[in-house]
Amino acid sequence: MDNIFKIRLGLTNTFLLRVSDGYLLVDVGTKRRTKKLLRILDDYNITPNQIKYIVSTHAHYDHVGGLAEIKEITGAKVIAHRNAKESLEQGRNSYVGLRIKWFNPIIRKILERVHAFKPVTPDIIIDDKYFFDEYGTDLRIIHTPGHTLCSISMIDEDGNAFVGDTAIRYPFKPLGGFSVIAADFKLLVPSWKKIIEEGAKRVYIAHGKSLKIERMIRKTKRKKWKSSTHKA
Ligand SMILES: [Zn+2]
Ligand SMILES: [Zn+2]
């Protein structure tokens, strides 16, 4: 844990990890938090050129809003899933929806019009699995679709998993408590299982406190989620 720094940017958690040749950022938050992020890095005595990689967990404005600017300032390589390439290059959010389907066209409009972001070209494209050799340790990035089709998660050798919005913890129980927003709900449980199979012990999520893997294991066994995996 000594090598992991959690940086809270508004409602989004981003993470800073020490890697062999510098630092790696998991997401960068919204555009309006870019200055804050740079200020925090400065507080840690980290110069922009020490940020070597930015793992983009998925193409949503609250994770990539400041990505173009941070990439430009740091010169870091942006790592993203193949499915995120088009959205990132067009500055457009990946599709996402609620279970209440009538609401989804409204969500899509809000994401398109209000929350578009500055286009950015990823440098390293991930498919199913990517071994991050430069880290000098067993750091892996895996495709974990569900929240979006471009969602990826990163797991380190100690079982720390950085999953972006692949799991979301909501403070309000009526909202469902766990991942109520997804592009494809039936893909969520298989993706959680992938994270579990990678040996994750603690799950670092972008919205809310981290959770123990046991909680995710329990969720994969719940009827509500199990049944959602069988829907067409
Ligand atoms: Zn998201
Ligand atoms: Zn988010």
Image (tube, rainbow, N blue to C red):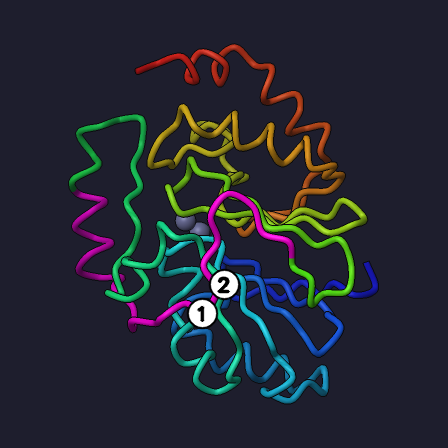
Q: Position of residue 157 (x, y in %)?
A: 78, 50
Residue type of the residue flagged with mark 2: Ile
**Mark 2 and mark 1: Cα distance apart in space:** 6 Å
Q: Which residue is drawn at 76% across and 73% down?
A: 20
Q: What element carries label 1?
A: loop
**In front: 38, or 25?**
25
Q: Name the residue under label 1.
A: 123
Q: Does the magenta stretch include residue 115?
A: yes
Disc number placed over residue 79 in the picture, else none: 2
Total number of numbered discs in the rendering: 2
Which span is picked out in magenta? 106-131
Q: Is mark 2 on a helix, strand or loop?
A: strand
Q: Which residue is drawn at 69% across and 62% down?
A: 133
**Mark 1 Cα shell of 10 Å, populated few (<14), some (14-19), many (≥20):** some
The image shows residue 125, relative to residue 38, as above or below, that is: above
The image shows residue 55, relative to residue 131, as above or below, that is: below
The image shows residue 166, relative to residue 23, as above or below, that is: above
**In front: 114, or 160?**
160
Q: Does the magenta stretch include residue 176?
A: no
**Quadrant of the drawing holding the C terminus:** top left
Q: Is residue 214 left or right of residue 61?
A: right
